[in-house]
Image (cartoon, helix red, strand yellow):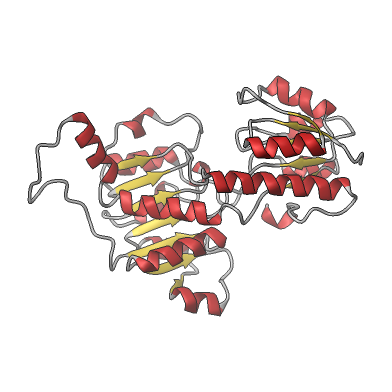
Amino acid sequence: MNQRPRVIVTRKLPDIIETRMMELFDCRLNLDDEAMSREELIAAVKEADVLVPTVTDRIDREVIDAAGDQLKLIASFGTGVDHIDFQACKKRDIIVTNTPDVLTEDTADMTMALILAVPRRLTEGEQRVRSGEWTGWSPTGMLGHRIWGKRLGIIGMGRIGQAVARRARGFGLSIHYHNRNRVYEDVEQELEATYWSSLDQMIAHMDIISINCPHTPATYHLLNRRRLQLMKSHVYVVNTSRGEVIDESALIEALTQEQIAGCGLDVYEHEPAVNPKLLKLRNAVLLPHMGSATIEGRIAMGEKVIINIRTFADGHNPRDRVIDTMF
């Protein structure tokens, strides 16, 4: 590849990253930070050597099929790659990279914040103060539930799941997990984590459930209506992974009928659209997909994108190349 490949970036990135990209590559930036339309994405892949998309860009088969022969790398700005049709890229010999590891601690922090916020009704209390509804302290006012001594079930015990477990132990939670593969014994011992081979059995015994697995065809609607009905009525569900992992309609039904106690969501099934029924629920804490939104995290993501592009342009295999086993 040309040492100054034509790089098209679909969204605005931190200034320091954009400046470095302009120095290194023949780069076209999105200074307005408006998500590209489908027509703009198709136009971009027809001329780019490297496309730098984000989770807001749906890079499906139609977009890939429209790409010119010069497109050889999609260096995604983000950890998840479920917005990219990997098989279509593989067919066209287009390499896909992502930015793993750098968002682990930020996302785990946000997960822990939701684990605290939902049972303790933090956002509901903040809204009462701002609206003027709060009239003073009361022995029975704003009662929530303590999390100390409760069981936390983590779905997906990868880097983020383990980081959540480390935080949760400090708050006195008992750690349980379900994962495609059991983690190493020394990790289990460090986290004092109990492995459940059956997801159904685990969720039926938990007080709080945290979703930290990626969205793949195998995890689509992993928490469906049947599994939500297996849960205890006092359970809280937290999702900082991908909205598609939960059947959102079934979740709303469970919350409305008080089959479960509450939820904390940073992601949504039809993002950026949020189901209006969710907005009306007092037992739902809703955030705008900000789990990884730290300055440090975004800069680290951009640095990884740059390294991936430079490595590939130099004729080497990028370290963060996405492989088949992720799908």
**Spot occupied by residue 77 in the image (x, y as percentages of width and height):** 66, 42
The answer to whether residue 82 of the structure is visible from this angle is yes
- Compared with 281, 319 (above or below) is below
The answer to whether residue 79 of the structure is visible from this angle is no
Left or right placement of residue 45 versus residue 1 in this view = left
Marker count (numbered): 0
Left or right placement of residue 63 versus residue 147 in this view = right
- Compared with 40, 228 (above or below) is below
Depth check: give the residue in front, 201 or 7. Answer: 7
Depth check: give the residue in front, 191 or 5. Answer: 5
Left or right placement of residue 317 versus residue 166 in this view = right
Depth check: give the residue in front, 269 or 284. Answer: 284
**Spot occupied by residue 204 in the image (x, y as percentages of width and height):** 36, 61
Residue at the spot 37% in from the left edge and 63% down from the top edge: 152
Residue at the spot 30% in from the left edge and 31% down from the top edge: 280
Residue at the spot 76% in from the left edge and 40% down from the top edge: 74
Left or right placement of residue 257 versus residue 190 in this view = left
Depth check: give the residue in front, 230 or 1. Answer: 1
**Spot occupied by residue 88 in the image (x, y as percentages of width and height):** 77, 40
The image quadrant of residue 254 is top left
The image quadrant where one finds the N terminus is: top right
